[in-house]
């Protein structure tokens, strides 16, 4: 296909000189560079990750550009091919995140095309409040990138519909869907993130701030955050279902929402909880075996939804690193980007398992990998 040639050129552009520079940086720090022929493959793999952890900004930018171009080759002029509706929102958000961090503006037309295709028909609203919220977050990201007030207005319109999901059942919170069958973490975390983000963007606002504070008061008292600082999936008979999975995106969206809330009246206390959740994930032998983010369903039982989850977490950790920089976060972001590129790639296509091996690619896994590469690019601490 015509689009494959420039993508391959981008991969070839990641030159030997970048690898030499990275290796030299390791040696300068007193490290040892192991070849892939090392007698100990675990040490070799660890060394490869260290090399990429001090990857030059130029090489990191090329990695992310290649992944972004491959993702946008799946864009069909309105949304993304062969993916779910909510995932079109998060894939577009991944492209926006790449442009925000890299300085590229290569895909601005795609934002406009999606907005024009669906704005007039209210297609961003449906029966699921989390679906709506993903689109609200995407348009907030689009506004932050472009300052086009149409995108901000679209996010406000979506949020207005989401408030209809709030009622007194289980003491508050919004429902997952308009069928009112389940109150879960993700819908309420997104609600928090959207409300706090809108407050932070609109001077003189009090309404969105009150929604954000109200949501957080309910969420933190709901039991959805365990004593180990991980978020379970939802409520069962108004009690936290402690046997439900601790999906990575549930951890991530709460972190992102709390970062926004810290600027919307939540202060240092909100950031403190965000740090607790982040550290719980980073230290979890189940969620971060050998330091690489892993979904509970991997390697063989994930569905179409779950392939997107890790990118959502890693982008949120990137936002926490921006708000409250820590070497631990920067190292984790770079280790995961290194593993995505070195262990989970065929050409410029990326699979489900970030620790490898490559098992095929789709829009969700591609967007998730782009989030990982972008987050590493944005984590400046320790770059030469």
Image (cartoon, rainbow, N blue to C red):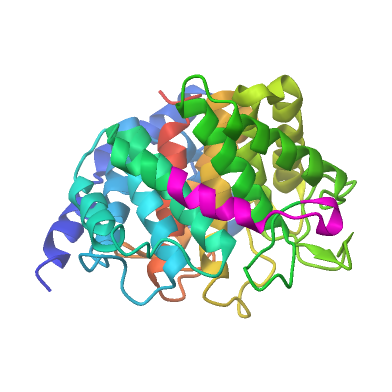
Task: Please give the name of the residue rendered at 68% of the width and 61% of the height, measured from the top-left corner.
Answer: 247
Nearer the observer, 85 or 318: 85
Would residue 161 be counted in the magenta stretch? Answer: yes
Task: Please give the name of the residue rendered at 57% of the width and 60% of the height, measured from the top-left corner.
Answer: 130
Magenta residues (range)? 156-172
Which quadrant is the N terminus positioned in?
Answer: bottom left
Which quadrant is the C terminus positioned in?
Answer: top left
Task: Please give the name of the residue rendered at 21% of the width and 40% of the height, measured from the top-left corner.
Answer: 105
Q: Main secondary structure of the magenta part?
A: helix
Q: Is residue 327 left or right of residue 98?
A: right
Nearer the observer, 40 or 128: 128
- Whether residue 251 is visible to the viewer of this picture, yes or no, is yes
Residue 67 at x, y percent in the picture: 32, 55
- Whether residue 19 is visible to the viewer of this picture, yes or no, is no
Nearer the observer, 109 or 338: 109
Q: Is residue 145 left or right of residue 160?
A: left
Would residue 223 be counted in the magenta stretch? Answer: no
Residue 229 at x, y percent in the picture: 82, 44
Task: Please give the name of the residue rendered at 27% of the width and 47% of the height, measured from the top-left corner.
Answer: 65
Above or below, 170 relative to 206: below
Residue 104 at x, y percent in the picture: 23, 38
């Amino acid at each position: 296909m015509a689009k494959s040639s420039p993508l391959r050129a981008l991969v070839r552009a990641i030159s030997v000189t970048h690898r030499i520079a990275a290796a030299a940086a390791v040696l300068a720090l007193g490290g040892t560079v192991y070849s892939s022929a090392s007698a100990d493959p675990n040490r070799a793999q660890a060394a490869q990750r260290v090399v990429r952890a001090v990857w030059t900004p130029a090489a990191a930018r090329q990695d992310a550009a290649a992944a972004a171009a491959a993702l946008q080759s799946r864009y069909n002029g309105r949304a993304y091919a062969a993916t779910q509706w909510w995932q079109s929102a998060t894939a577009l958000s991944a492209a926006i995140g790449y442009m925000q961090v890299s300085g590229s503006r290569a895909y601005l037309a795609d934002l406009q095309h999606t907005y024009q295709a669906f704005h007039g028909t209210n297609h961003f609203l449906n029966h699921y409040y989390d679906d709506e919220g993903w689109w609200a977050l995407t348009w907030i990201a689009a506004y932050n990138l472009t300052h086009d007030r149409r995108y901000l207005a679209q996010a406000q319109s979506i949020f207005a519909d989401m408030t209809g999901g709030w009622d007194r059942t289980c003491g508050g919170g919004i429902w997952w869907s308009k069928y009112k069958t389940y109150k879960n973490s993700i819908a309420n975390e997104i609600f928090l993130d959207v409300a706090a983000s809108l407050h932070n963007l609109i001077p003189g606002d009090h309404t969105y701030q009150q929604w954000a504070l109200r949501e957080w008061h309910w969420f933190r008292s709901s039991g959805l955050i365990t004593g180990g600082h991980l978020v379970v999936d939802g409520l069962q008979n108004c009690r936290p279902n402690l046997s439900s999975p601790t999906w990575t995106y549930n951890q991530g969206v709460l972190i992102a929402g709390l970062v926004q809330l810290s600027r919307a009246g939540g202060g240092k206390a909100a950031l403190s909880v965000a740090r607790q959740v982040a550290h719980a994930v980073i230290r979890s032998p189940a969620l971060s075996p050998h330091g690489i983010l892993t979904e509970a369903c991997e390697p063989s039982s994930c569905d179409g939804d779950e392939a997107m989850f890790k990118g959502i977490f890693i982008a949120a950790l990137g936002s926490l690193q921006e708000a409250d920089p820590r070497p631990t976060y920067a190292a984790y972001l770079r280790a995961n980007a290194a593993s995505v590129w070195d262990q989970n790639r065929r050409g410029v296509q990326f699979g489900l398992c970030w620790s490898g091996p490559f098992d095929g690619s789709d829009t969700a896994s591609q967007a998730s990998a782009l989030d990982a590469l972008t987050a590493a690019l944005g984590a400046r601490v320790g770059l030469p």
